């Protein structure tokens, strides 16, 4: 088990004024009669540092900034930011209210006036702005529940400003790849390496198993032990769930070096844990996890409420994806042939996804009755999004069961109205190619669960919150859902405009990324595809889909392809 530690912070500031005076009066700095005043501020921490050099770093940074001057500092900042931001452009249409201040436009959403397509585009690009601002390739840590925008209210809460591994931290990074911000994903990749190293001790001490494991939450020092309550604390696949972002990063980039040096080693050790931890179910003969839970939810057996079970749906989805990825990666890298054999044998014994007697996707191995049918977590639906074990055309019966699950939860009057749940609803309906339902939930997210500055929040009474608590996962989850409505690239195909709502009838988007190291531009009018452009950066064989049309697509590196409304593909000169 890893133990948290403390760290130190040192900050420097410098006030500069043109004209007037600057004086210190007690505990105040007072500027009088100045034509212009600038405040330069720098701070550093000893986190991750092995010597005392960090103590002087803020002073050096401050001197460098003052030498540049405010105008040059601002110019350099904008240039640095735009290098990432300009990669994606989105136009979803315009309306008569586009000129209004953001808070007034949000009020209109609250009152049911949602004909403001550019507010959705603004929310999308705002999510990209937050990612660019809070997670860079050289950031020492990934974004936590509040990102870098913590306030005093959030800081008072026990679950704030940590890494929740039962969807929240994952959702922070859902939009990075498709929104062309792969570099912003790197802090999480590096953190996962550290988490896997810390989790080896937890795997050994708590379970007597090989490999590594982490549970429901973590922190800057890689806390990996279970929590202290069975309803949420024994989420044995929390570390695996967040580690699946390694797979995403590889599938979008096809970076073989990253696969060999980071993704596969971390995932292989996770597979080692589950190969050791799992057991054969005495009734079904399936290979299952247990004890484990479906995070924070519970079920009835007769009149008794339980949280722990064998083989929860979340676990089996994550483990199957893990084993399949490790098997394919080992084959690609041509190594660990003995591990490949074990993985093949284990995959053959994993349980299938099951449909309950109410037509719903089962959350547990058995068709238990939910003790909390209003609950905010829908962990088993990761099989639909962000996973792809359930697809609209590949598994139609399971897709119908996923829809029933969503509808059952949505129909509950006491459903916990939470930013990450609403974002999950939107993304899940996008995967079901239901643009109107996805639009409905995004409207709710922006209109009912966002402050005037568009930062999303969790309502009072949920998980101990006393007031509206800012949580950034709603921003990133909503950003990811908007991208899913316009472009999907899972299950072996690139799907154009899969969930386009009627109110985004005319628009264009450029710079979105698809799995396979591909960039895509799309133009549509009156709800119909007009043209698309695909730029390939790696060799790739896939399928291109628009509605019920599907054509094979063979791409070669550094070539650009034009697609018309009939999906005719032409390589550009």
Image: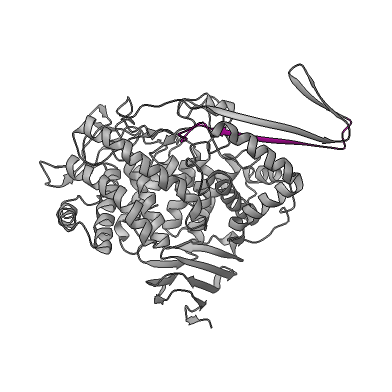
The magenta region covers 33-52
Q: Nearer the viewer, residue 164 or 197?
A: 197
Instruction: Name the image colouring.
Output: one colour
Which quarter of the picture shows residue 367? Answer: top left
Q: Nearer the viewer, residue 389 or 2?
A: 2
Count of numbered badges drawn on the protein: 0
Residue pictured at 58% horizontal, 61% vertical: 87
Where's residue 58, x and y in %?
Answer: 62, 35
Which quarter of the picture shows residue 389? Answer: bottom left
Where's residue 125, x and y in %?
Answer: 60, 53
Where's residue 204, x and y in %?
Answer: 22, 34
Residue 148 lies left or right of residue 50; in this view the side is right
**Residue most extreme to the top:** 26
**In the depicted structure, whether residue 469 falls above or below residue 493:** above
Q: Is residue 259 visible?
A: yes
Q: Is residue 37 magenta?
A: yes
Residue pictured at 19% horizontal, 37% vertical: 209
Where's residue 382, x and y in %?
Answer: 36, 49
Q: Is residue 504 magenta?
A: no
Q: Is residue 116 visible?
A: no
Q: Nearer the viewer, residue 565 or 454?
A: 454
Q: Quadrant of the N terminus?
A: top left
Residue pictured at 33% horizontal, 28% vertical: 227
Which quarter of the picture shows residue 235? Answer: top left
Residue 378 lies left or right of residue 438; in this view the side is left
């Amino acid at each position: 088990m890893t133990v948290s530690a403390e760290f130190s912070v040192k900050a420097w500031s410098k006030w500069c004024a043109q004209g007037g005076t600057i004086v210190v009066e007690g505990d105040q700095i007072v500027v009088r009669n100045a034509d212009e005043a600038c405040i330069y501020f720098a701070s550093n921490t000893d986190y991750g540092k092995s010597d005392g050099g960090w103590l002087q770093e803020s002073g050096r940074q401050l001197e460098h900034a003052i030498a540049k001057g405010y105008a040059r500092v601002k110019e350099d900042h904008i240039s640095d930011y735009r290098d990432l931001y300009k990669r994606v452009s989105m136009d979803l249409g315009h309306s008569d209210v586009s000129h209004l201040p953001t808070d007034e436009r949000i009020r209109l959403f609250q009152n049911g006036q949602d004909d403001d397509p550019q507010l959705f585009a603004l929310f999308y690009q705002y999510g990209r702005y937050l990612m660019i601002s809070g997670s860079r390739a050289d950031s020492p840590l990934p974004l936590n529940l509040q990102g870098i925008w913590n306030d005093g209210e959030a800081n008072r809460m026990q679950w704030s400003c940590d890494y929740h591994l039962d969807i929240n931290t994952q959702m922070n990074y859902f939009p990075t790849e498709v929104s062309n911000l792969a570099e912003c994903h790197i802090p999480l990749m590096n953190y996962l390496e550290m988490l896997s190293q810390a989790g080896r001790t937890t795997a050994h001490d708590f379970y007597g198993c090989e490999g590594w494991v982490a549970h429901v939450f973590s922190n800057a020092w890689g806390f990996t032990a279970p929590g202290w309550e069975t309803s949420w604390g024994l989420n044995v696949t929390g570390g695996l769930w967040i580690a699946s972002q390694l797979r995403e990063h590889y599938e979008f980039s096809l970076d073989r070096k990253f696969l060999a040096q980071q993704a596969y080693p971390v995932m292989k050790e996770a597979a080692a844990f589950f190969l050791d931890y799992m057991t054969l179910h005495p009734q079904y003969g399936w290979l299952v996890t247990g004890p484990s839970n479906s995070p924070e939810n519970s079920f009835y057996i007769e009149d008794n409420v339980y949280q722990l079970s064998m083989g929860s749906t979340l676990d089996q989805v994550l483990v199957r994806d893990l084993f399949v990825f490790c098997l394919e990666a080992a084959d690609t890298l041509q190594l660990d042939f003995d591990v490949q054999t074990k993985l093949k044998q284990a995959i053959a014994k994993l349980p299938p996804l099951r449909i309950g007697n109410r037509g719903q996707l089962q959350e547990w191995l058995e068709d238990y009755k939910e003790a909390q049918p209003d609950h905010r977590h829908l962990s088993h639906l990761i099989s639909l999004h962000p996973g792809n074990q359930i697809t609209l055309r590949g598994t139609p019966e399971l897709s119908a069961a996923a829809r029933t699950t969503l509808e059952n939860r949505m129909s509950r009057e006491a459903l916990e109205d939470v930013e990450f749940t609403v974002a999950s609803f939107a993304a899940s309906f996008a995967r079901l190619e239901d643009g109107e339902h996805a639009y409905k939930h995004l409207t709710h997210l922006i209109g009912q669960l966002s402050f005037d500055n568009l930062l999303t929040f969790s309502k009072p009474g949920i998980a101990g919150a006393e007031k509206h608590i800012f949580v950034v996962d709603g921003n990133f989850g909503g950003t990811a859902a908007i991208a899913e409505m316009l472009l999907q690239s899972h299950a072996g195909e690139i799907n154009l405009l899969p969930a386009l709502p009627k109110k985004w009838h005319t628009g264009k988007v450029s710079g979105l990324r698809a799995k396979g190291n591909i960039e895509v531009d799309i133009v549509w009018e009156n709800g119909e595809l007009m043209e698309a452009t695909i730029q390939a950066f790696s060799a790739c064989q896939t399928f291109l889909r628009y509605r019920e049309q599907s054509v094979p697509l063979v791409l070669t590196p550094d070539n650009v392809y034009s697609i018309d409304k009939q999906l005719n593909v032409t390589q550009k000169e």
